[in-house]
Image (cartoon, grey):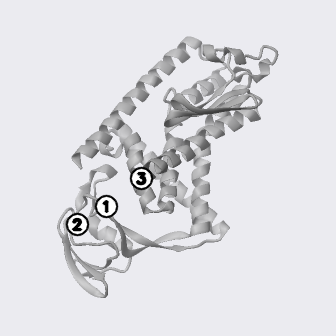
């Protein structure tokens, strides 16, 4: 039950904020919004508030905002406004349509920044210690005598004073056995652990499957804002690096996941604490921001680039082109969903 609630909470925050960005911009530019929907498929709940229907559907893997348009599905024809042509999406200037499409992904970017600042200001900056807070299932550490609460004081006869030193030792091991000296209940215990290659990271790092306990140092709002901006910039740099590797064919397919992986990670994050769950929401927000800027039909990128073309050339893409463009997008999305789901299932079967 907790896993399902964590999954819905993560998707609800990320998707809801994304669609709210579109919704708010449309309303700002005077476009009539017919429906604001979270999820796809059969309706679970709906409520009519003013001129907009707010709906929750069965499959929580996205959402959409339906503006008033000239070419509407049959079920929406009754919403046409023949006496108010300015309320149609097509009636607003191209630059306004561009801002409307950009509002979704940039809402996710803004939310990620706000959550980072909030974490640093309210909870504090997480400073890792050498005490272990979590051991991942089916990891080298879980198959050794290491326990949660152990404090790492020595690795291969070298004293350890900071968590970064532990990470460096494991990374430099190249999969060779490491001798850990651990402090447990004021006793010193020696444990041998053989690191393994983490294929899911796509970076070829060696890991043993542990995470440290953190001490939190609270920051003032200005310092929290600076830290939040820096962390956001670092995360975006890593994401762009991953996209570059994917285009070059250098990224590991194991690092790509779909709905099942999101469910598993959100469940695990919920068990580790609310702060970890918020961090997961930040990372998914950043991924959604970047993904929606790619020229993929069906997603925001599929609308952004035709509008940019219209603004630069003064030529609006034809309806035929847009239909083909959207069909290509649907095909790409189905292939991506099939690939990520296959990856998720294969990952589960391996474990």
At horizontal 51% and vertical 51% (from top left) the residue drawn is: 281
**Label 1: which secondary element:** loop
Do we see residue 258 in this rendering? Answer: no
Quadrant hosting residue 48? top right
Q: Name which of mark 2 and mark 3 comes first in the sequence.
A: 2
The residue that disc 1 covers is 136
Q: Name which of mark 3 and mark 1 comes first in the sequence.
A: 1
Do we see residue 49 in this rendering? Answer: yes
Q: In the depicted view, which residue is nearer to us: 254 or 17?
A: 17
Q: Position of residue 308 (x, y in %)?
A: 61, 28
At horizontal 62% and vertical 36% (from top left) the residue drawn is: 102
Q: Name which of mark 1 and mark 2 comes first in the sequence.
A: 1
Q: Is residue 220 above or below residue 344?
A: below
**Label 3: which secondary element:** helix
Q: In the depicted view, which residue is nearer to us: 338 or 230?
A: 338
Q: CA distance from mark 1 to mark 2?
A: 19 Å
Q: Position of residue 333 (x, y in %)?
A: 43, 29
The residue that disc 2 covers is 173
At horizontal 77% and vertical 17% (from top left) the residue drawn is: 81
Q: Is residue 19 above or below residue 230?
A: above
In the displayed structure image, the side of residue 60 where residue 193 appears, left or right: left
**Label 2: which secondary element:** loop
Q: Position of residue 25 (x, y in %)?
A: 70, 36
Q: Could you tell me how many numbered marks the image carries? A: 3
Label 3 environment density (alpha carbons within 10 Å; few <14, some 14–19, many ≥20) = many
The residue that disc 3 covers is 267
Marks 1,2: beta carbons within 8 A: no
In the displayed structure image, the side of residue 145 where residue 328 appears, left or right: right
């Amino acid at each position: 039950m907790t896993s399902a609630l964590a999954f819905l909470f993560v998707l609800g925050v990320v998707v809801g904020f994304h669609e709210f960005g579109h919704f708010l911009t449309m309303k700002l530019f005077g476009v009539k919004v017919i429906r604001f929907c979270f999820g796809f498929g059969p309706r679970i709940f709906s409520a009519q508030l003013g001129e907009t229907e707010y709906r929750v559907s069965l499959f929580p893997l996205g959402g959409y905002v339906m503006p008033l348009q000239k070419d509407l599905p049959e079920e929406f024809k009754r919403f046409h406004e023949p006496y108010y042509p300015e309320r149609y999406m097509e009636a607003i200037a191209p630059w306004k349509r561009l801002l409307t499409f950009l509002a979704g992904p940039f809402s996710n970017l803004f939310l990620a920044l706000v959550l980072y600042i909030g974490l640093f200001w309210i909870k504090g900056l997480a400073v890792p210690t050498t005490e272990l807070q979590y051991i991942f299932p089916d990891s080298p550490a879980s198959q050794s005598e290491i326990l949660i609460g152990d404090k790492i004081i020595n690795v291969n006869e070298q004293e350890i004073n900071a968590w970064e030193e532990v990470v460096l030792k494991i990374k430099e091991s190249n999969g060779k056995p490491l001798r850990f000296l651990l402090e447990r209940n004021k006793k010193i215990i020696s444990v041998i652990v053989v690191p393994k290659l983490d294929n899911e990271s796509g970076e070829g790092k060696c890991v043993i499957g542990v995470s440290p306990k953190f001490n939190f140092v609270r920051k003032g709002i200005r310092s929290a804002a600076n830290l939040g901006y820096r962390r956001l910039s670092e995360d975006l740099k890593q994401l762009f690096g991953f996209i570059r590797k994917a285009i070059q064919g250098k990224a590991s397919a194991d690092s790509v996941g779909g709905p099942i992986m999101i469910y598993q990670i959100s469940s695990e994050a919920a068990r580790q604490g609310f702060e970890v769950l918020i961090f997961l929401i930040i990372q998914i927000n950043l991924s959604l921001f970047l993904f929606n800027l790619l020229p993929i039909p069906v997603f925001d990128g599929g609308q952004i680039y035709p509008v940019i073309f219209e603004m630069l050339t003064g030529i609006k893409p034809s309806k035929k082109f847009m239909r083909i463009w959207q069909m290509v997008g649907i095909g790409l999305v189905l292939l991506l969903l099939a690939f990520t789901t296959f990856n998720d299932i294969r990952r589960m079967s391996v474990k």
